[in-house]
Image (cartoon, rainbow, N blue to C red):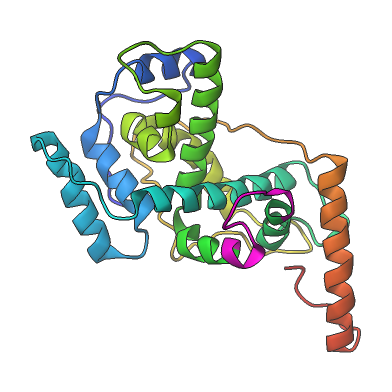
Amino acid sequence: MEIPRFPRKFTKPDLSNFLRQRLSQTIVLWPEQAIPLVGYMAWPNEPAARDDGLHMLRSWGHGSTAVPPRLRRIQHEWLRVADVFHWYCDLMDGRHQARRGGPSIGKAITLVAAKAQSCGTSEASLWLYWEKYKDVAHLVTAAALIRREARIQSRNSPFGPLGLSVNQFVPFQMGMLMPDLVLAVALEFEARGLREPSVAWAEPAFDPQTLWRIPPDINVEAFPHLIREPGPDDLAILNARRAGNWGKANKRQGGKSISPL
């Protein structure tokens, strides 16, 4: 991933004050970092589409109002992928399902699909989104998490008349206005995605050969993310899925254990 180094080192800020400072206006402070970042997020494996999108975004500085195609839909898909990967990290950090093969993307997808009430959240759709954005899942998850925090804080205390409204707090804007914070949070997610989730299941969520890794010299310090604790209902969903899947697998494989995915 080719993103220029930030001229000033980004260290762990007071999050509340940082969000208020950045989101009380709509100036893109770091366009050389922000535009490539959202380009990778939107078109991770489509270089031609990425080039076209980057051209449109850079033209905004010259008065253009052209919007990359499907940008609203892309962000919808980002949020689904972010939910999946965030739950995967929560299961890993909480050491849940250790006796049942450990955390996996498949289990996170089952959990999201069971809890979701919006369109496009069937397990089949979630797998399609994951395949499309898995190489930037750390980035889109960071942007989605920051968006959520910004919305919560804005509802409690609006950021001011010159900033974005609550409805304008979308992952794309988080990447454009706060690329340093997005990358800082994404560093933590990147590390988790490359880590072996458990002794029983050694394959990490990310493919180290295809992942768009954050440059080590980007001048950004990792910022820890919020860990959600699965409740009893969440664990019941996973336990039911696990038992059902293994029962069918054993029947097909003659009792031989196969992948916990």
What residue appears at the point 39 percent right and 33 percent down from the top-left corner? 174
> From where the camera sits, is residue 85 visible?
yes
Count of number-bearing discs = 0
Picture quadrant where residue 19 is located: top left
Place of residue 138 in the rendered image (x, y in percent of width and height, measured from the top left): 50, 47
In front of the other: 61 or 202: 61
- Is 136 located above or below residue 155 in the figure? below
Q: Is residue 165 above or below residue 172?
A: above
Identity of the residue furthest to the left in this view: 62
- Residue 29 is one of the magenta-drawn residues: no
- Side of 46 relative to 245 (left or right): left
User: Which residue: 49% across, 17% down?
Assistant: 154
- Image coordinates for residue 37, horizontal then vertical, percent: 32, 44
Q: Where is residue 245 in the image (x, y as percent from the top left)?
A: 83, 71
Tell me, yes or no, whether the highlighted magenta stretch contains residue 116: yes
Magenta stretch, residue numbers: 114-126
| The C terminus sits in image quarter | bottom right
User: Left of 2 or right of it: where is 119?
Assistant: right
Q: Residue at x 88, y 51 (%)?
A: 236
Check the image and report above or below for 159 versus 237. above
Q: Which residue is drawn at 78% across and 41% down?
A: 230
Q: Would residue 257 appear left or right of 51 to someone viewing this image? A: right
Query: Does the rendering let one see residue 207?
Result: no
Q: Position of residue 83 (x, y in %)?
A: 60, 47
